[in-house]
Image: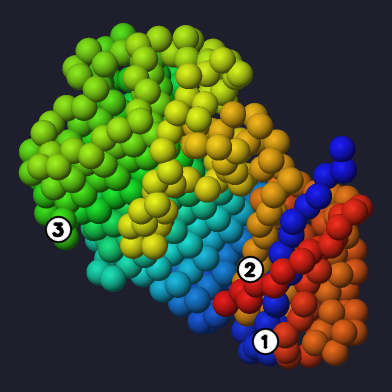
Amino acid sequence: MKRKLLLSCLMLIAAATDATTWHVGPSQTYNYCSQVASLVQNGDTVLIDFALYQNDTQVIWAKNNLYIAGSGVRPRLEAGSIIANDNVNGKGIFVISGANVHVHNIEFANAAVIDHNGAGIRQEGVNLLVTHCKFDGNEMGILCGSIADCKTTVEYSEFVNGGSVFNPGYQHNIYINHIDTLVFRYNYSHDAIAEGHELKSRANYNFIYCNRIANEQSIDSRTIDLPNGGTSVIVGNIIEQGPNSANSNLLGYGLEGFINTAPNNLYVSGNTFINKKSTGSFIHVAAGTDTLFVKNNFMTGASTGGLIIGTPTVLDSSNNIVNATPTANGFIDVANFNYHLTTTAQAINAGIVIPDMIRGHELQPTQQYVDTCSYEARVLSSLPDIGAFEYNEGQFIAEESDITFSIYPQPAGSWFYLHTNRNFNSASLQICDMTGRTVWTGNLAGTETYINTADWNTGVYLIQLNDIHDSCNKMVIVQ
């Protein structure tokens, strides 16, 4: 069968810029990030060569609009004794105090400090974007302070083994304090240790979309903790509690008091919840919750404390599947954490279409998570399937549907990366200026393709992505 790829053409705005690109690496002038942090200016780029960087000092990024990225294969920044013994200002590997910073394609590991809040990234400035990073064995993967009018976005990133055995229960894979908005999507956060959470957020608005958030074997606490209410939208996730979890519920909401901006509404749709403990409950909401919306969710495993704990003012619930035995639900391979559906799954076509949107975010998932830290289109063949995945017929259609791709930084200076959500090495790429003159041709390099634009004129360029059979057939302007 001929596979047709429905792709998008993007407009790239290549802009003249006075910003500087700083290179860090074993063979560069600057061997460590700490050597360039005081030199960068607003709008600069820092590119870090692939290498293992051990025991650097804490790096404070104080300028605005920075782009800090691993170049090529992801470099690993591994904290050591210098940060651990910093009695004056030890916070973590990166401290981001500038505004509008983008951190991309970097691995942060083993951050530990005197107060046990050692972070891969400590966020102190507004509007941080983190993409394609990994946080491994830090006391906190990302620790965001209380920041007014701040939006934090985390995408395509992995968090594992966050927590501190010296302060159990208070350190987490990711911990967002009081900010306006958290957007958390296409991530894999798993196996927090020492009774930490895989995700804890006190943001006024939480949009948690299409992630794998799971405890498999470690001793964590609840999988998602939203302790101060506000508006939270949890759509299209795999949310799993392992047999060793110290808590007994997977999702907690408002359990430390409603101090966020009202109303206190929790929307939960199109998720697969798995509890592999012999006890527990799935959702625990505090008294005073205004609305609990629960639809099209697959909830499997023990619910000895009740499916939902707490009594919201409004409970809007329908088309959920509840089953006490994970292995009896038509999943492909429960033992190996594969919760895609088989032909016998009760969930197929058992959901309802949910047209509602909350602050521009859909309650009907249009994508589904793909390991590791990616997604694919979720296309309906009939009524929605219940849970985080459509049956394989929908998955087959998804393979033939839109490929998403993005450009960063944007506007581009002397270079940019083109990111695609799946690996299509056979796809050819052609870039033309607005007169139709070809300025670049080549093939995609996996999911990340680096394009050098140093010799291009300022202007708008058209990117055309082709496969063996078809070329793109629509346009999108990327702002």
Instruction: Tell me where residue 176 appears, x and y as whole percent.
Output: 31, 52
Whole-number angstrom distance, CA of label 3 to CA of label 2: 35 Å
Answer above or below: position of 436 versus 138. Answer: below
Q: In the rendered structure, which disc, 3 or 1, sits on the residue that comes first in sequence?
A: 1
In this rendering, the label closer to the viewer, 3 or 2 = 3
Q: Which residue is mark 1?
A: 15
Residue lying at 76% horizontally and 81% vertically, measured from the top left: 461
Could you say whether the residue bearing mark 3 is in a helix, strand or loop?
A: loop
Q: CA distance from mark 1 to mark 2?
A: 13 Å
Q: Can you say which quadrant of the picture contains the C terminus?
A: bottom right
Q: Residue at x 56, y 15 (%)?
A: 344
Instruction: Report the front residue among 232 and 456.
Output: 232
Q: Is residue 40 above or below residue 376?
A: below
Q: Is residue 459 left or right of residue 261?
A: right
Name the disc covering residue 99, or none. Answer: none
In the image, what residue occupies the spot 26% across and 41% down?
Answer: 293
Residue at disc 2, secondary structure: strand
Q: Position of residue 410 (x, y in %)?
A: 61, 75
Image location of residue 164, percent across then percent down: 34, 33
Quarter containing the N terminus: top right
Q: Amino acid at mark 2?
A: Tyr
Check disc 2 and report the residue beneath it. Answer: 408
Residue designated by label 3: 262
Q: Earlier in the sequence, mark 3 or mark 2?
A: 3
The amino acid type, in three-letter code, at marker 1 is Ala
